[in-house]
Amino acid sequence: MAFSSWFSRFSSYSRNIYRIIQSSSVHQFRTQSMYAAEALNSGGTKPVFSWSSSLIPLAVTLSAGSIVFDFGRNPSMCDAAGVDDYRGGTVGGKYSTDLVVKGYRKDVPEELIDELRAICGEDMTLDYDERYFHGKPQNSFHEAANIPDIVVFPRSEDEISKIVRSCNNHKVPIVPYGGATSIEGHTLSPHGGVCIDMSLMKNVKALHVEDMDVVVEPGIGWMELNEYLEPYGLFFPLDPGPGATIGGMCATRCSGSLAVRYGTMRDNVINLKVVLANGDVVKTGSRARKSAAGYDLTRLIIGSEGTLGVVTEVTLRLQKIPQYSVVAMCNFPTIKDAADVAIATMLSGIQVSRVELLDEVQVKAINIANGKNLPEVPTLMFEFIGTEAYSREQTLMVQKIAFEHNGSDFVFAEDPEAKKELWKIRKEALWACFAMEPSFEAMISDVCVPLSQLAELISRSKQELDASPLVCTVIAHAGDGNFHTLILFDPNQEEQRQEAERLNHFMVHTALSMEGTCTGEHGVGTGKMKYLEKELGIEALRTMKRIKAVLDPNNIMNPGKLIPPHVCL
């Protein structure tokens, strides 16, 4: 018995040490069944260590010393492809500049295809066009060397559990797919695998009007949900881009223009149900508005970007539709003046529900796209809510603050249709930008800093943007320090892409120097991984990797996202 146990440990250590040594070589070993975009990852090779001469003595030494390293639970303690990428300065590691997210994949076993067909019936496809569509985000310049091998459309939590369990058994990657509005490559499938499209799971499962909460499936969009809630006098207050779904909003920990008053997704989710990598279904909490029971699993999953599990049910906190609201706009000679007013408004204690900043280039894009004739100068947009008297009082207070900072043309709207039209212009800002350069891609920054630093960040960034030959627009959720730049570039012109990357890099590092973040609401995906070590530190990233290794030992859950590939355990 003792010898059998020792030999089992010896074999396990040998296999895993061999994997580690393999992954440290510059050119990764591949089996014949694996094929990758090797042309994208070409380079010199190093000889692989001899199994008999090099590994056995090392394994015996480790085993004899009873050193228990549980590498077997996660074959990729240091992502093999990622190590090469990091050393070569490509996607994922620090200093990443490559556009295409590399990956490797193996043929999906026919047995898995049969299992998925038995689970989903006709709600799955191997069609190339459908797979290509799911492999290319709609609003992102990020690309991957591969696309999903299969797309499934589950209709229930039970189907998702069975799908995930089958994929885990075959060690085939999974990529959850919601509204495809994310912009950092979250839904790319660099390693192929199975794309789980949640579009058929969009039911409202329960509405508790007196408790002001609702239980929904992940595929429902926030706009659809608010249409459902309106007759009850309730609404869900987060408003990211049109088309975003609740599941994807949980995955990226999104927010929107109303976050300055109602908080982000982490503040508005009461509990979740999630399918883990082994197929288990976990409910993260009760429906109580507050709880001190155990680890906060809800907020562990929110923002995990599908790397820890697949969200199947969400209980959301709701708000009463405001009794009255006023929308105001004001123009400024400089963008710093506009940012200063946003900061002064927040410091005054006025409870605004929205404070949005647009620079003159963004206003020009809106004029071109929508046939408007707005003054092409830096502009602030506000929304005030409450009673009619309170909303008007707030409007007049902000008007006074604006005029003290060189504001002009302060106008406000109270008519429901006029207010809706104003906010529609803001929500469609991304598409308006493409009216200036219809064939271009957009690289979108998402930095966020402490509120006191916002004016300085925008001023420094604006100087750099104005000096660039590229078309760059500025949009900011100015009430909470979140600042976006849309940098338009021709994807066929490498120098333009590099210039866009340089500008984005400048803004991120400027924000980090001000104790800010590389992403306030868009999430990490593949595009922001390279900045995480500077922002969070290597120990924080190793802690994340340890959590990932425990919950997803086979690394099937949206691999290649969120955690930089150079982070090793």
Image (spheres, rainbow, N blue to C red):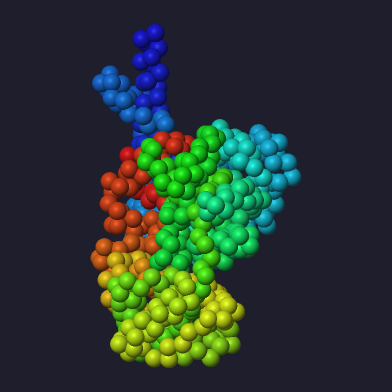
User: Which residue does the image show at 66% across and 48% down from the upper left?
Assistant: 153
Choose between 249 and 564: the one closer to the eye.
Answer: 249
Choose between 334 and 63: the one closer to the eye.
Answer: 334
Residue furthest top as drawn: 1
Q: Say which quarter of the image contains residue 297.
A: top left
User: Which residue does the image show at 26% across and 63% down from the upper left?
Assistant: 515
In this view, 565 is above or below 476: above
Choose between 65 and 236: the one closer to the eye.
Answer: 236
Q: Position of residue 416 (x, y in %)?
A: 58, 78
The quadrant the N terminus occupies is top left
In this view, 371 is above or below 186: below
The quadrant the C terminus occupies is top left
Choose between 50 and 374: the one closer to the eye.
Answer: 374
Q: How many marks?
A: 0
Q: Say which quarter of the image contains residue 179.
A: bottom right
Q: Position of residue 362 (x, y in %)?
A: 46, 81
Q: Can residue 473 be spotted in the picture? A: no
Q: Can residue 207 be spotted in the picture? A: yes
Q: Position of residue 260 (x, y in %)?
A: 40, 66
Q: Position of residue 451 (x, y in %)?
A: 30, 69
User: Which residue does the image show at 34% across and 55% down from the upper left?
Assistant: 532
User: Which residue does the image show at 28% across and 46% down from the upper left?
Assistant: 539
Relative to 232, 460 lies left or right: left
